[in-house]
Image: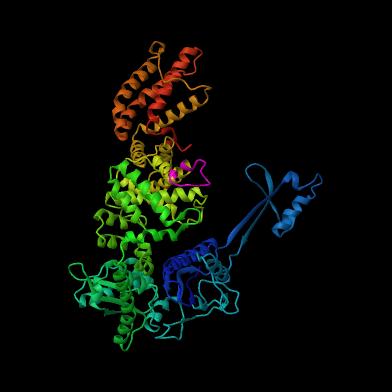
Amino acid sequence: MNNQDLLIEIGTEELPPKALPGLSKAFQREIEKGLKLNNLAFEDSRLFATPRRLAVLVTALQTMQDAVTVEKFGPALKAAFDDQGKPSKAAEGFARSCGVTVADLKQKNDGKLEKLYYSAEREGEQTTALLPEIIIQALADLPIPKRMRWGSSREEFVRPVHWAVVLFGEQTVKTQILGIQSGNETIGHRFHYPQSITLNKPAEYENLLSDTGYVIPDFNIRKEKIRHLVEAQAQQINATIDLDEELLNEVTALVEWPVALTGSFDDRYLAVPREALISSLKKHQKCFYLEDNKGNIKANFITVSNIESLDPDKVITGNEKVIGPRLADADFFFNQDKKYSLESRREKLQTVIFEQSLGTVFDKTERVAKLSSYIAEQTGADIPLAIRAAQLAKCDLLTGMVGEFADLQGTMGQYYAQHDGEPEEVAQAMSEQYLPRFAGDQLPESNTGIVLALAERIDTIVGLFGIGQPPTGSKDPYALRRAALGILRIIVEKELPLDLASCINNAISHFSDLPETDNLDHSVLDFIFDRFRAWYADEGISANIFLAVDAVRTSNPLDFDLRIKAVNQFSTMPEAEALSIANKRVSNILAKLDQQPSADIDSSLLTEAAEIQLAKKLSALLVEVKPLLEKNHYSRALTAMATLQKDVDSFFDEVMVNTDDELIRNNRQSLLQQLRHLFLQIADISLLQSS
């Protein structure tokens, strides 16, 4: 069967830069999915993405579906014909559904009965006939949060569509795509080559666009070119550059023909906090900042233009004229803000609403200060510093700098606290309260920062759960899941022996009126601990191990984590499976009892050698593991418990638990209760079995 290359290109207005990489990958994935669903084999596929186009090149695609054999079983022969051998209505109906007469049907045994049987070879469809629906479905399934319409058209897409290419081999597939008639003509760069480029075959696409159209269609090739251009510009002025991948991706999504240019700004703006300079250059102007060999920011920037100008100095000057006022604003706000202390702004927080039902930001700082005091006491941190940090934590929200550069909240709080002469740890906590901001982000370093970061998150989660606004499956506007994971990371990675349940209850006590108070503490604790699931899944720890530890949950996340790691290690031991099965068996036996037995064993009622040996081993282990459990040495304790495996197996092989003698039966049940309790001090290992 013949194979041909396929090119699909959708030409649009400028696509959202941050969404472009994900959008292009989704387009490739959906096209591949459509081809596979239609049983069309291909060799490979490649995606292309620029600000004005999404494209997929599929190599060696079948020109036609393979022929398939259609097989159908109809009614049993007894039901297919009457006593005179005439076809029944069931037989006739089956024949009609197959498009034949009853006489054309065969008979075949389906493994149970002789039945009417239909078999036919069906020709596959031409790929060109299937492509329109595959493309339309792929575009419909793209993850576009909000689609738009344009002109009088009722078509919807992320941006208006201006052209479409569907080229299969040398054949142009004519179809309507989002209101546009597809063809074999793409369009070059908006300024350098705003003309049609005829494509004769898919393999020409990349080179024609690059050589003729001033477009580098491959996102990754364009990205690496920008990286090289920017680094070369930095070297020319003896500067170093730490390329931010997120910014690099965004710039790549903004240009089709990149040209790197170096500009400068007034040296006096270097007095502005480093973070404000970087924010101005990166987030607002999409420029790369530069450093000298000592790590200090230089009064230069690199911008990536989408045109190869005949007068690049004018382009540089234009960028400098935009960046200059932006940095002047930062300089102005910084100097103005320093005229007023953070403390002097605190009362004004009473005019800023945190959440309508939870009061003002000032109210929140009051609650957080009380909770910070409690957490500081539990962790050995400085209580006055924790209270002071909590009181000042949100004051920088009222500064001009944060008003203009919202991403600098906390960061500017630290600068202003230092300027005000606040203790260094209080100043450091101003920025550390927001750590970690995302998965894998750094954690607070100072004790006060750790306390404040925990208190802020716990107060927010408790408050929102308390007014009936927990996250839903699709919505989490306050990022409570991220906050919960942050709490767990701080406690576990900083090795804080902190009881989370007591912190939650302390937080609840500082709210004056929460409508959803029934089981609020349990709801919040369950929500936070449920974040552990994804954490451990990422570490390759099975769900069964999580469930085994969660069954005997401690409210101390650090202790929980130690148990998880111990059980995970135990699960790899050769004795683990047998002991898990035994614990499952013990659990089932005890669950059927009307009353749970005592764990006290009467040694005089032990008659069988296997139960005597098990009781002896259990007695010794109870003494051995007690100090280990007290010191949270769960791995060592489970290693010791693993030595029970042979004795437990012998017990079940040789001893009848439910014997007729009531005293002996109760005593054996007590022995099993003692065995079960021993393991339950760490986890319910019976749950390590998947069923």
Above or below residue 102? Residue 318 is below
> Residue reaching furthest top?
604
Figure disc tally = 0
Q: Compare residues 517 and 581 and report the one nearer the observer.
A: 517
Q: Report x, y in % for residue 389.
A: 32, 53
Q: Residue at x 35, y 75 (%)?
A: 285
Residue 254 belongs to magenta span: no
Most extreme residue toward the right is 84
Expressed as whole percent of the image width and height from the top left, the position of residue 338 reads 29, 66
What segment is highlighted magenta in the picture?
A: 508-521
Identify whether 684 is placed above or below 270.
Answer: above
Q: Find out whether residue 509 is within the magenta segment.
A: yes
Q: In the drawing, does residue 526 fall left or right of residue 235?
A: right
Q: Residue 468 vs residue 533: left or right? A: right
Point out residue 114 in the picture as x, y percentages from the top left corner: 68, 44
Q: Could you tell me which residue is drawn at 60 percent across and 64 percent down?
A: 123
Q: Is residue 435 visible?
A: no
Q: Say whether residue 514 is left or right of residue 450.
A: right
- Expressed as whole percent of the image width and height from the top left, the position of residue 673 reads 43, 23
Q: Main secondary structure of the magenta part?
A: loop
Q: Front-most of 519 and 95?
A: 519
Using the rendered image of the protein, determine whether residue 2 is visible from the camera's viewpoint: yes
